[in-house]
Image (tube, rainbow, N blue to C red):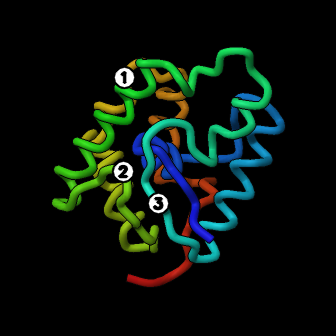
Amino acid sequence: MTVRLRAHHLLCMLTYVGRGYSPAFTANYDRIVERLNSGEPVLVIEGPDDICSPLLNEEARPHCLSARVRERDARAAIALTRWLDDPVEAGRRLRPHRKLLERMRTAFAGGKTRQACLGCEWRSLCSSVAANGYAGTLLDAGSGN
């Protein structure tokens, strides 16, 4: 199987510590992190992804569909493409192994990819997690290159 993620969720997963919009959202995110930790690959998509799915079922008009969130995806894709020197766009497959996560977390903590976080309600939590060396994050993606 493959985990489908929109571009800005490639950044969100770096600081995920088990908190979310609702119990259903958090339980779903926990399952996705388990899948990634077991080595499942990521397919970058446009629009709502596997992380968004509980919100699509619970909300009348989920924020996942807003222009603001699509702009966040675009900024994340640009920043990650620049930092990784490899296109991050819809259709791209990634395997979030430990070395890639370390590189992405270094960029995130250094502000290199934070343009995507402008206006996000989770920004302060993510900043705190990054400032604390990513202690308590649930994604480790095992070992590998």
The picture places residue 24, in percent across and down from the top left corner, at 82, 38
In front: label 1 or label 3: 3
The residue at which mark 1 appears reads as: 118
Name which quarter of the figure residue 68 lies in: top left
User: Contact (CB < 8 A) between labels 1 and 3?
Assistant: no
Instruction: Determine the residue located farthest toward the bottom in the rendered image.
Output: 144
The picture places residue 107, in percent across and down from the top left corner, at 28, 51
The residue at which mark 3 appears reads as: 43
Amino acid type, callout 3: Leu
Choose the circle earlier in sequence order: 1 or 2: 2
The residue at which mark 2 appears reads as: 90
On screen, residue 72 above or below 12: above
Q: Is residue 10 left or right of residue 35?
A: left
Q: Is residue 86 left or right of residue 105?
A: left
The residue at the point 22 percent across, 52 percent down is: 81
Choose the circle earlier in sequence order: 2 or 3: 3
The picture places residue 32, in percent across and down from the top left corner, at 67, 57
Name which quarter of the figure residue 84 lies in: bottom left
The picture places residue 122, in percent across and down from the top left corner, at 54, 28
Amino acid type, callout 1: Leu
User: Can you say which quadrant of the picture contains the N terminus?
Assistant: bottom right
Q: Is residue 114 left or right of residue 29?
A: left
In front here: 13 or 46?
Answer: 46
Name which quarter of the figure residue 118 lies in: top left
The residue at the point 40 percent across, 28 percent down is: 70
Amino acid type, callout 2: Ala
User: Can you say which quadrant of the picture contains the C terminus?
Assistant: bottom left
